[in-house]
Image (cartoon, rainbow, N blue to C red):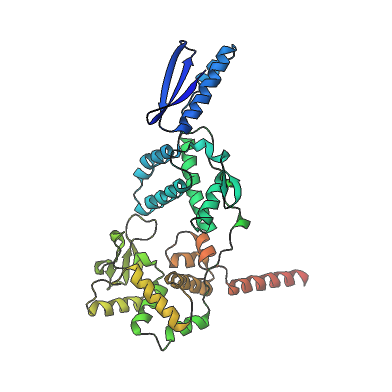
């Protein structure tokens, strides 16, 4: 019968091939791979010994792919064709997260049948990944689910390309809606906005910083002047058209800088900074910007982030226009679903208008 032995740094599988009745051998780097092949040839030999259809087993022989092999193939064939470095980096983070839980030499098809004790509870398959990422690495469930969404894309690609014979991950492996914490984001009140921009303890510079983000609705990494990791995103003076009130921004998921209209009040602030000799429009990195926002938040007693100022613009636009599409366009986001769920949900004014319309329609029928 077929046998398995350790040979130096490899694992050797010896077997008898019924096609020529000769003894042969194969070598593998990992025991897991060797055991799978051993089981295959033991079954082939058993079929041959009992005059069963061993050819059906033999000619369907196919090496099992490891996670490393799938990730490497995806990197070489998919990621290498992408031009957005942020997307490439995102997938690399996702791949690394998977390998923190399942070593790269893991046979991909075995993940779903694996069992593991996580914090005193025996779980199996992709629940192992979810539990370890949440308990050991302190990731939020929404963050884990986002990773699993991208892993699902990788494994579906491998299946469609016939690198693997069966689904390694399914949509049902991800968190269900009821397992995720409700989405929460800051909703600005008129009183908070009034207090924020009229607070006597804030300097003009602090107010200008907030105004820039609130009136433009840009993301921080699209406008900061120093970004060592992504220098191509930095905003410099030649990216601002003072005369025509425009900026040239490299926005999220865009390939090139695009022209963005800027309100004259923001241009006036940039002009002021330019005249004072500032090297760049926002002459700081994200860490320095975040420090300023935290100082402002502490001074005024309102908890908010730089990203919440972006939300402020979307909320104001939706409140006054009752138009989700305009709110989305106002902050340069192409997904109205994301804006509706994360930035500017339905307003009381919109609900009130709908209720009035329903009332009027009902009364017209009753009359």
Image quadrant containing the C terminus: bottom right
Front-lying residue, 24 or 282: 24
Q: Is residue 167 visible?
A: no
Q: Is residue 10 left or right of residue 37?
A: left
Percent from the top left, x then y, of residue 252?
39, 59
Percent from the top left, x then y, of residue 47?
57, 16
Which residue corresponds to the image point at 39% horizontal and 52% vertical from the top-left?
87
Q: Is residue 91 visible?
A: yes
The image shows residue 48, relative to residue 354, as above or below, that is above
Front-lying residue, 271 or 133: 133
Total marks shown come to: 0
The image shows residue 306, relative to residue 128, as above or below, that is below
Q: Is residue 351 left or right of residue 37?
A: right
Residue at the outermost left position: 277
Percent from the top left, x then y, of residue 30?
43, 33
Which residue corresponds to the image point at 26% horizontal and 71% vertical from the top-left?
280
Front-lying residue, 206 or 131: 131
Percent from the top left, x then y, of residue 53?
57, 15
Which residue corresponds to the image point at 54% horizontal and 57% vertical from the top-left?
141
Residue at the outermost right position: 366
The image shows residue 259, relative to residue 113, as above or below, that is below
Based on the displayed image, in which of its 4 quarters is residue 103 positioned? Answer: top left
């Amino acid at each position: 019968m077929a046998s398995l032995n350790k040979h130096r740094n490899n694992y050797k599988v010896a077997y008898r091939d019924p096609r020529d009745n000769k003894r042969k051998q194969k070598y593998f780097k990992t025991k897991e791979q060797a055991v799978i092949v051993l089981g295959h040839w033991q079954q082939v030999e058993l079929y041959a010994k009992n005059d069963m259809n061993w050819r059906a087993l033999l000619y369907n022989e196919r090496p099992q792919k490891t996670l490393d092999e799938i990730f490497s193939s995806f990197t070489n064939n998919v990621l290498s064709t992408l031009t957005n470095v942020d997307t490439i980096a995102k997938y690399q983070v996702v791949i690394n997260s998977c390998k923190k839980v399942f070593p790269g030499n893991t046979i991909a098809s075995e993940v779903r049948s694996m069992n593991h004790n996580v914090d005193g509870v025996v779980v199996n398959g992709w629940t192992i990944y979810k539990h370890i990422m949440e308990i050991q690495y302190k990731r939020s469930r929404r963050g884990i689910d986002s990773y699993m969404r991208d892993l699902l894309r990788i494994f579906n690609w491998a299946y469609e390309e016939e690198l693997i014979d069966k689904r390694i991950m399914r949509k049902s492996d991800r968190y269900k809606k009821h397992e995720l914490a409700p989405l929460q984001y800051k909703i600005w009140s008129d009183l908070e906005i009034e207090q924020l921009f009229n607070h006597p303890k804030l300097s003009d510079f602090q107010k200008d910083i907030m105004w820039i983000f609130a009136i433009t609705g840009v993301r921080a990494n699209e406008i900061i002047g120093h970004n060592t990791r992504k220098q191509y995103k930095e905003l410099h003076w030649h990216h601002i058209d003072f005369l025509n009130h425009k900026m040239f921004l490299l926005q999220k998921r865009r390939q090139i800088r695009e022209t963005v209209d800027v309100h004259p009040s923001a241009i006036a602030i940039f002009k002021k900074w330019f005249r004072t000799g500032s090297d760049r429009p926002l002459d700081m990195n994200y860490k320095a910007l975040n420090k300023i926002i935290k100082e402002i938040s502490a001074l005024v007693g309102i908890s908010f982030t730089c990203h919440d100022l972006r939300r402020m613009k979307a909320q104001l636009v939706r409140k006054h226009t009752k138009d989700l599409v305009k709110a989305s366009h106002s902050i340069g986001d192409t997904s109205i679903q994301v804006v509706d769920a994360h930035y500017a949900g339905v307003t009381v004014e919109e609900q009130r208008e709908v209720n009035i319309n329903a009332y009027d329609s009902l009364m017209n029928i009753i009359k």
